[in-house]
Image: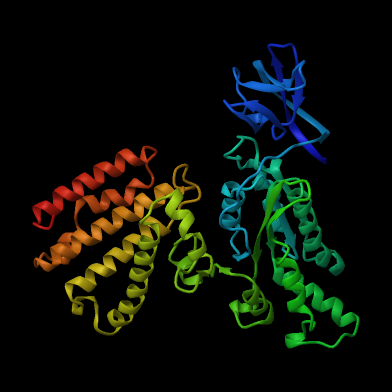
Amino acid sequence: MYRGFSRRLVHIRTAGGRVLAVTPVHKLFAFLPQLSQIPAGRLRVGDSIAVPGEDGGLTPDVIRRIEVKPHGSWVYDITVPGLHNFVGGNRPALLHNTVTEQQLSKWCDAQVVIYIGCGERGNEMTEVLSTFPKLEDPYTGAPLMDRMALIANTSNMPVAAREASVYTGMALAEYYRDMGYNVALMADSTSRWAEAMREISSRLEEMPGEEGFPAYLSARLSEFYERAGRARTLSGLEGSVSVVGAVSPSGGDFSEPVTQGTLRIVKVFWALDTALRARRHFPAINWLTSYSLYAQILEEWFRKNVNEDWPALRAWAQRTLQEEAELEEIVRLVGADALPPDQALTLEVARMIREIFLQQNAYHPVDTFCPPARQFKLISAIKRYSDLGQKAVKLDVPTKDVAGLKSRELLTRVKYEAEFDKELEKALALMDEEFKGLGAA
């Protein structure tokens, strides 16, 4: 049972005369067509909910009318969540980007989002308070704030409050996990939390460690991050807590104790790059220094749920970007014209991966979110262009002719199209036709 504020209630009237008024996230048993649990906000007229029968079993009762009415009062709601397999992202990661955190809050596979503002500027927290209610939850259509809890302890608040805020957020996350929910916890930032611990430790006259931080800093970081993950409760329900910890080291120094202590614990690292930000490449996550140690663990899931070729394509894209970084050093010394045609094409393909696949516009209605199936089609199209391009340059076709094809321009625009599959087919058909004209198809 939990206590929460609901701005809407779903009023349901059935053929059997039953009248229900529940919150949109309240889960009801329904025959769809088999007996399963579904949030009330997703039920439609004509669906059959399960009600007790005279023989003690469950019988279907058809929904005749559904109304969603505004309701501004505190409610107590008992939910019976079903089993939800949380795949990927159920361990901590590092980032510090307001727009990226908003995107994670909006599109992450979680029913509850908890945002901890620990030691941040008051203006930053005010921006979150004013922005998040305007963001729409893509799963329910309601304001994103309806499934969020915001814990704000700004830099001018007491040190003890800043230290306690992270633990408060984690306690809330575990509370909802115990009810079978998948929870996303944003901690912004753990560096300010560590600074609060340093200040308290100094006042207690404890023995300081590196850079004045307490000797138990690593232990506290471990205790916090290790509370993340999937859990099966005593009731048999399964929930998860996914922690996104933002580390903001002074001057971008990754050798300071908080960053190093965090990197020893977590298995996913997203490194923000100021050079990418200056080039207007968003999200500004450096693909060479960032890493995930879950890639091999998740390969089987991607093979089964996306495509068999996903791991191979991912490895090819990483290889191409690594080759680009090595070739850029040569280009800076001798110039791009000194490169052989195949290496010049590698630079062009790497540029396509960066601009078409890695870059995203958070404010575009289509490009704001890209499901794995669409990601696979996009990177497959770039790989196809690369393979045909390598055949063309071996036939002495100039690299500038390969880079200037109209199909390459279409591939750049296809990710913004609402009818993605249709536009991608057009681009691929034109690509085959153009390379055939070059004698490479």
Front position in the image: 172 or 97: 172
Q: Quadrant of residue 14?
A: top right
Q: Quadrant of residue 251?
A: bottom right
Q: Residue at x 34, y 66 (%)?
A: 316
Front position in the image: 147 or 238: 238
Percent coordinates x, y for residue 237 in the rendering: 72, 46
Q: From the image, which quarter does the C terminus lie in? A: bottom left
Q: Residue at x 65, y 70 (%)?
A: 247
Q: Residue at x 63, y 64 (%)?
A: 92
| Left or right of 429 on screen, residue 231 | right
Residue 25 higher or lower than 234, as above or below? above
Percent coordinates x, y for residue 57 in the rendering: 73, 22
Percent coordinates x, y for residue 385 in the rendering: 24, 57
Q: Quadrant of residue 424?
A: top left
Residue 208 higher or lower than 6, as above or below? below
| Left or right of 385 on screen, residue 259 | right
Instruction: Indicate how the structure is coloured in the image.
Output: rainbow
Percent coordinates x, y for residue 293 in the rendering: 53, 69
For the image, the number of numbered tags is 0
